[in-house]
């Protein structure tokens, strides 16, 4: 049951992350830059988490060692978003999205090389299917030329690696893993907001919120694709691990496609439909993987105990 909840939290996290365009695009249309939007997103989400902690009477107290790990996580979280948006300026957003979603491969490699955790064949199959589905969904944004500079490719790969490091650190550092979920989320968001604030100060400063409509969208952005998604992400990583949670991240572009079709009237093409099917198949395999792995292990155990017949 705990693993089932973990899968549910993982799908909730990636699905709510996919709501980003629903609130971000209207704000951008009013003139706010991505750095200012991301800074407000983290700041407002931090306030919401702090209120929730106050209601639940959860202490804000921490220590220097724990705070340093929170700062590392905040830097990885900031780096992932910042590098990805920089890469968007050097290549098509479709190609950038596809390359960014190589991060499950990064998680798998880190777990294998550093923590000696071998991925199951079902996890590898799910990664391949999920990445193929993301690539097909991204074709709608690729447009004509798909050329990209070496710098752009490096930026987006570092973006995925930064997010992979974020997930792995959250699950494998005992001091982080044992910390309260709300407190962990609060400090990660605060440090991430500080990094974005520094970034905006070096590029013209934080912009003022232009209207009440923009403020409403920023608050919704802070609540659904930030507060809800990050709390669900922490629960998922602590329940099913960083590798399986990362593969479930393929639900994010799927949700973005659904939003694009339902809200912005975008058209579903044949490749997009196939991409949706592959992502759903990938998620199904991940959810069923513990059962499938157990059945295979039981079958191998029975085969090893079966007596050998002599001819």
Image (cartoon, grey):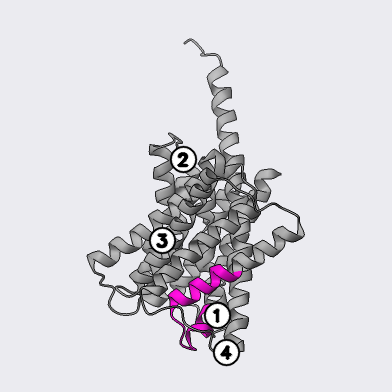
Residue located 54% across and 55% down the image: 248
Report, in whole angstroms, how far the alpha carbon at label 4 lies from the one at label 1.
Answer: 27 Å
State which tag comes first along the sequence, 4 or 3. Answer: 3
x and y, in percent, of residue 225 in the image: 58, 68
Residue 266 visible in rendering:
no
Mark nearest the camera among 2 and 4 is 4
Q: Which residue occupies the foreground of this view, 103 or 36?
A: 36
Residues under numbered marks 4 and 3 in contact, where contact means CB atoms less than 8 Å apart: no
Please give the label number shown on residue 261. 1
Name the one closer to the observer, 43 or 301: 43
Q: Are marks 4 and 1 in contact (CB under 8 Å)?
A: no
Q: Which residue is mark 2?
A: 119
Residue 15, labelled with which disc? none
Label 3–label 2 contact, CB within 8 A = no
Please, what secondary structure does the residue beneath circle 4 have?
Answer: loop
Query: For mark 1, does the 10 Å Cα neighbourhood hold few (<14), some (14 to 19), or many (20 or more) residues?
Result: few
Callout 1–callout 3 Cβ contact below 8 Å: no
Q: Which residues are magenta?
A: 22-44
Please name whichever residue, 286 or 197, is drawn nearer the observer in this view of the structure: 197
Q: Nearer the viewer, mark 1 or mark 3?
A: 3
x, y percentage for residue 259? Answer: 57, 77
For label 2, the SS is: loop
- Pointer 4 or 1: first along the chain: 4
Q: Nearer the viewer, mark 3 or mark 2?
A: 3
In the image, residue 272 sits, relative to residue 55, either above or below, namely below
- For mark 3, what is the residue? 79
Spot occupied by residue 115 in the image (x, y as percentages of width and height): 44, 36
Residue that numbered label 4 is attached to: 211
For discs 4 and 1, the disc positioned in front in the rendered view: 4
Image quarter of the N terminus: top right
Viewer-proximal residue, 78 or 242? Answer: 78
């Amino acid at each position: 049951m705990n693993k089932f909840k973990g899968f549910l939290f993982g799908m909730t996290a990636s699905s709510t992350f996919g709501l980003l365009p629903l609130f971000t695009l209207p704000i951008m249309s009013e003139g706010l830059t991505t750095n200012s939007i991301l800074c407000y997103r983290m700041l407002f989400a931090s306030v919401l988490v702090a209120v929730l902690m106050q209601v639940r009477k959860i202490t804000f107290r921490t220590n220097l060692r724990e705070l340093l790990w929170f700062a590392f996580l905040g830097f990885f979280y900031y780096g992932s978003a910042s590098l990805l948006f920089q890469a968007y300026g050097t290549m098509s957003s479709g190609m950038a999205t596809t390359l960014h979603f190589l991060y499950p491969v990064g998680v798998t490699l880190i777990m294998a090389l550093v923590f000696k955790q071998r991925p199951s064949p079902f996890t590898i199959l799910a990664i391949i299917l999920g990445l193929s589905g993301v690539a097909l969904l991204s074709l709608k944004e690729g447009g004509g030329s798909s050329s990209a500079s070496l710098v752009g490719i490096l930026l987006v790969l570092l973006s995925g690696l930064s997010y992979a490091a974020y997930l792995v650190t959250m699950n494998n550092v005992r001091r982080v893993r044992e910390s309260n979920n709300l407190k962990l989320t609060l400090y990660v968001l605060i440090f991430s907001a500080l990094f974005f604030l520094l970034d905006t100060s070096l590029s013209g400063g934080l912009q003022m919120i232009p209207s009440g409509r923009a403020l409403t969208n920023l608050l919704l952005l802070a609540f659904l694709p930030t507060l809800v998604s990050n709390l669900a992400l922490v629960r998922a990583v602590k329940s099913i691990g960083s590798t399986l949670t990362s593969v479930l991240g393929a639900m994010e572009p799927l949700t973005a496609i659904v939003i694009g079709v339902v809200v912005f009237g975008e058209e579903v093409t044949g490749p997009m439909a196939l991409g949706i099917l592959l992502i759903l198949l990938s998620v199904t395999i991940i959810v069923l993987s513990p059962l499938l792995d157990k059945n295979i292990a039981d079958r191998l155990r029975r085969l090893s105990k079966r007596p050998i017949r002599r001819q």
